């Protein structure tokens, strides 16, 4: 997990060294202060609702599998009009973690090249100690669900029309190119 785990507004450290065999389920419902901090961190006008439900289960030798979902209602600025627009985040969460130094964290190499299946699951991420911040993980998937270019419905971004430079104002290259175009 990233360093954001230490500073996540929805931080929820969970000890994973003694998980029940069937795992445990955690629900995170952000309060108003946490939602305001999420909005500031992710450059949003507001976060109206943040909810995550995560199931954390043991995985192989000392590893942990986290599955769940994060949902949020947010307000963003339209990239064209700057008016507030509502957005909805609904992301599935799936991540696998292994203790630092575990052989399960090694990525296979083939002939000196790193081989990853783009359609396959991500390789396990290492973690240090006996706990994971599953709130920070939920925030990472929340961030992935934010529309980077929100646009109000029906609004178009028309590029400004370029005026053709007058023949006299055109540089020597432009004049030569025009001669070539006219010739062919």
Image: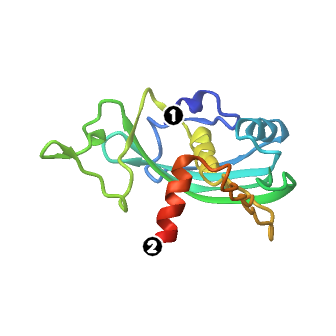
User: In the rendering, which numbered label is found on residue 70?
Assistant: none
Residue farthest along the right direction in this orientation? 83
Distance from label 2 to label 1 (Cα)?
58 Å
Q: Quadrant of residue 101?
A: top left
Residue 144, position as x, y percentages in the image: 59, 51
Residue 86, how many percent across, how many down? 81, 59
Q: Residue at x 64, y 28 (%)?
A: 7
Tell me: residue 120, above or below residue 100.
Answer: below
- At 20% from the left and 45% from the top, the residue drawn is 113
Residue named by callout 2: 184
Label 1 secondary element: loop
In this rendering, would 75 be left or right of 134? right
Front-lying residue, 172 or 64? 172
Residue 142 percent location from the top left of the image = 64, 49
**The C terminus, quarter of image:** bottom left
Q: Is residue 43 visible?
A: yes
The numbered mark, 2 or 1, whose residue comes first in the sequence reads 1
Residue wearing tag 1: 2
| Left or right relative to 69: residue 41 | right
Binning the other alpha carbons within 10 Å of mark 2 as few (below 14), some (14 to 19) or many (20 upward) gives: few
Q: Picture coordinates of residue 155 (x, y %)? A: 80, 66
The residue closer to the viewer here, 8 or 170, is 170
Residue at 79%, 56% in the rendered image: 80
Nearer mark to the viewer, of 2 and 1: 2
């Amino acid at each position: 997990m990233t360093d954001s785990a230490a500073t996540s507004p929805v931080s929820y450290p969970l000890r994973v060294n003694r998980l029940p065999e069937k795992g445990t389920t955690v629900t995170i419902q952000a309060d108003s202060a946490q939602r305001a901090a999420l909005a500031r961190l992710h450059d949003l006008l507001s976060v109206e609702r943040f909810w995550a439900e995560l199931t954390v289960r043991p995985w192989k030798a000392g590893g942990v599998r986290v599955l769940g979902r994060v949902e949020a209602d947010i307000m963003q600025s339209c990239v064209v009009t700057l008016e507030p627009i509502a957005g909805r985040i609904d992301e599935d969460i799936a991540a696998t973690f292994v203790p630092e130094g575990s052989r399960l964290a090694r990525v296979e190499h083939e002939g000196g090249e790193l081989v990853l299946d783009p359609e396959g699951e991500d390789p396990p991420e290492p973690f240090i100690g006996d706990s994971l911040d599953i709130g920070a993980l939920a925030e990472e998937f929340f961030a992935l669900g934010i529309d980077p270019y929100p646009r109000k419905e029906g609004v178009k971004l028309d590029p400004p029309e370029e005026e053709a430079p007058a023949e006299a104002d055109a540089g020597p290259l432009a004049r030569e190119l025009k001669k070539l175009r006219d010739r062919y």
